Amino acid sequence: MKIGIVGALEEEISIIKEIIHNQEIKKNGTFKIYQGKIKNNKIFLIKSGIGKVCASIATTMLIHLYKINIIINIGSAGALKNCLQIGDIIIPKKICYYDVNLTNFGYSKGQVPKHPKKFNIDKNLYNIFKKILLKFNLRYSKGLIVTGDSFIRGEISKKIKYQFSSAIGVDMESAAIAQVCYHFKIPYIIIKSISDLSDNHATLNFKKNISTASFQSSKLAKLILENINF
């Protein structure tokens, strides 16, 4: 099985880099792709950079160059629900954009034309991950993550919560990765850890907690990669 792993920041991929056996580094443009094995799976790890376009480029590159079977996106997200705290894990079942609006043409808020209203993660892949999480008694939240090209805090957060009342988290990459995987029919899953609460202190908290959030999401990805059997 060929597994592509996408993280936006160095902090988000560092733990996975350390456990890839027989590692090789390939360069393509400005990207570095870390290749090797974890158990019986071939791993292709890439730092995409921040934002939707960077995430789309990196994901497309992995799929086309290496004929990837599965994409895993790891990293951080801002919380949109009061029940979530710093370091909590989110594995969304649905993803959409918060900064796409063609409602005047009859589309739902966040829906790209000729695309589903929301992107759904692969059910079979989700169930495999769920079994591993239950085995190790690990807690996580599921729901909707919304994506856009802004760091969300304060009043903007309140607007997003109003427009997407079921959303539990917000980030800058997930929906773009989901859209790419939708086009190429590649199963994918998103693992995010809360870095901030999307409030007036979000910037400070992100800087303070990005290492914690990155560690939590990549630690969970590491556990899954070491225990998954396809």
Image: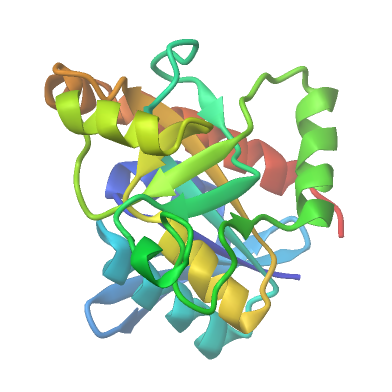
Left/right placement of residue 226 relative to residue 48 reads right
What residue sits 53% from the left and 88% below the top?
Answer: 64
Above or below, 91 relative to 216 = below
Coloured how?
A: rainbow
Q: Quadrant of residue 208?
A: top left
What residue sits 60% from the left and 38% below the top?
Answer: 91
Residue 43 on image: x %, y % = 60, 65
Residue 50 on image: x %, y % = 25, 56
- Number of numbered discs: 0
Can residue 23 be seen? Answer: no
Quadrant where the N terminus sits is bottom right
Residue 202 on image: x %, y % = 19, 23
What residue sits 29% from the left and 74% below the top?
Answer: 31
Above or below, 39 relative to 157 = below
What residue sits 35% from the left and 77% below the top?
Answer: 57
Q: Quadrant of residue 127?
A: top right
Nearer the observer, 60 or 105: 105
Nearer the observer, 54 or 38: 54
Quadrant where the C terminus sits is bottom right
Can residue 122 be seen? Answer: yes
Residue 28 on image: x %, y % = 32, 85
Nearer the observer, 115 or 85: 115
Above or below, 114 relative to 197 = below
